[in-house]
Amino acid sequence: MVSAAVTRHTTVVTVVTAVHAPSARYLPDAWASLCEQELPGGARWEWVIQEDGTTDEVRPYVPEDPRVVFHQGRPGGPGVARTIALAHARGAYVKVLDADDRLTPGALARDLAVLQARPDLGWTTCRVLDLLPDGSTAGFPGDPDEGPLERGAVLRHWQANDFRPPVHPATLCVRRELLTALGGWMALPASEDTGLLLALDAVSRGWFSAQAGLLYRKWEGQVTGQSSHTDPAERTARAAVAEARARALADLGWTYPAP
């Protein structure tokens, strides 16, 4: 359990990670990337790791660090694991970090700087580099310009580009109160993070940082690489639900922050 005291004046970023047994071996790498983060003004991070299941295979990879909390629960997919992890979050900001990914140095500080300086923004994203099995990295074209993302911009791009958003939901950093108001991650078998991104886009402005903040690991066992992830019928159904939610939120007229 986390033992360090948190005063009401301390800025805390809660990093949330869903993990299952096959990806647990990458947790030490994710932790190493967290340890490289330097936050300004006495701000600090905490890491909530939530196993999607109750096996004995994950805990051996959880770092012995007072800033790290580990919990287990009934399996329900990564969206369920991340959402239940919010029960243990104490930060005003929530940063996503998948178990098999790594943050780049300065990533958390950049997220925090934007959200603290811009109360009109609800969330941030950043550029991603693929981390290949040989240790090399690869970028890809098509990122938006650095700066604010207006409400509805993500949905429009997603609709016009075969359900592909212009920014990567694995890089999200979001105000916790906004994340909670939207109910956390969607209860979908996949694309639960894209569903959340579209919901955020419907009610609030975001930000894109052009500096790479995440190394997205490519490996044989990753969930998004499985054939079930791209099954056409399920993919269409997931997209329909995510789009309907985003449209309903936009039509209701509720925005964050409140006008």
Image (cartoon, grey):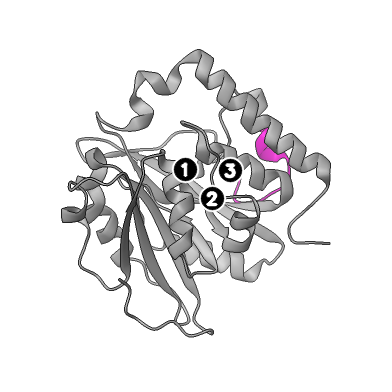
The secondary structure type at the circle numbered 1 is: helix
Location of mark 2 (residue): 125
Q: Does the magenta stretch include residue 156?
A: yes
Q: Where is residue 45 in the image (x, y as percent from the top left)?
A: 40, 69
- Counting residues from the N terminus, which is met first, the one under dot 3 or under dot 1? 1
Local secondary structure at mark 3: helix
Identify which amino acid the numbered label 2 is placed on.
Thr
In the picture provided, is 177 more to the left or to the right than 230?
A: right
Residue 222, picture quadrant: top left
The first of marks 3 and 2 along the sequence is 2
For mark 3, what is the residue?
Answer: 196
Q: Is residue 37 left or right of residue 185?
A: left
Graded by Cα atoms within 10 Å as few (under 14), some (14 to 19) or many (20 or more), the crowding at tag 3 reads many
Task: Please identify the residue farthest to the left as the structure is shown.
Answer: 60
Which stretch is magenta? 145-157
Q: Which quarter of the rendering shows the N terminus?
A: bottom left
The reply to whether dot 3 and dot 1 touch (C-beta < 8 Å) is yes
The answer to whether marks 1 and 2 mark residues whose Cβ atoms lie closer than 8 Å is: no
Nearer to us: label 3 or label 2: 3
What number is the disc on residue 79? 1
Instruction: Give the percent coordinates (x, y) of residue 218.
Output: 30, 34
Which of the pair 30/70 is nearer the observer?
70
Name the residue type under label 3.
Answer: Leu
